[in-house]
Amino acid sequence: MTKFSELPTDVIISCVARVPINNYRVLSLISKLIASMITSSELFVARSAERSKETLVYCCFTDLNQVPR
């Protein structure tokens, strides 16, 4: 049986590219190899190639009662 770390990098990236972004934090705990791949530009390219489009909502909150310094 082949160890995970012995798989070709492009195979691992292809697998990780199919995982939803919101699971990346937990996925990064599996190994240092995966953690480094999650932040790589190769993964971004692979996700773009897979056309992995997810609905993402970014929010920015502010306290209107807070006095500016």
Image (tube, rainbow, N blue to C red):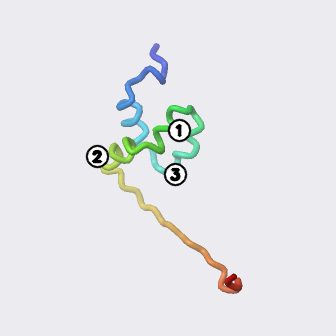
Q: Position of residue 40 (x, y in %)?
A: 43, 43
- Residue beneath disc 2: 49
Mark 1–mark 2 contact, CB under 8 Å? no
- Residue at image position (41%, 32%) is 12
Q: Given this view, does label 1 or label 2 mark the residue nearer the observer?
A: 1
**Quadrant housing residue 64:** bottom right
Please tell me which residue lies in front, 17 or 64.
Answer: 64
Q: Neighbour class for label 2 at 10 Å: few (<14), some, many (≥20)?
A: few
- Residue beneath disc 3: 22
**Secondary structure beneath label 3:** helix
Q: Earlier in the sequence, mark 1 or mark 3?
A: 3
Q: Which mark is residue 14?
A: none
Label 1 sits on what residue type? Ala
Mark 1–mark 3 contact, CB under 8 Å? no
Q: Which mark is residue 35?
A: 1
**Quadrant housing residue 59:** bottom right
Horizontal side, residue 38 vs residue 25: left or right: left
Q: Quadrant of the C terminus?
A: bottom right
Q: Earlier in the sequence, mark 2 or mark 3?
A: 3
Label 3 sits on what residue type? Asn
**Secondary structure beneath label 1:** helix
Compute the Cα span from label 1 to label 3.
14 Å
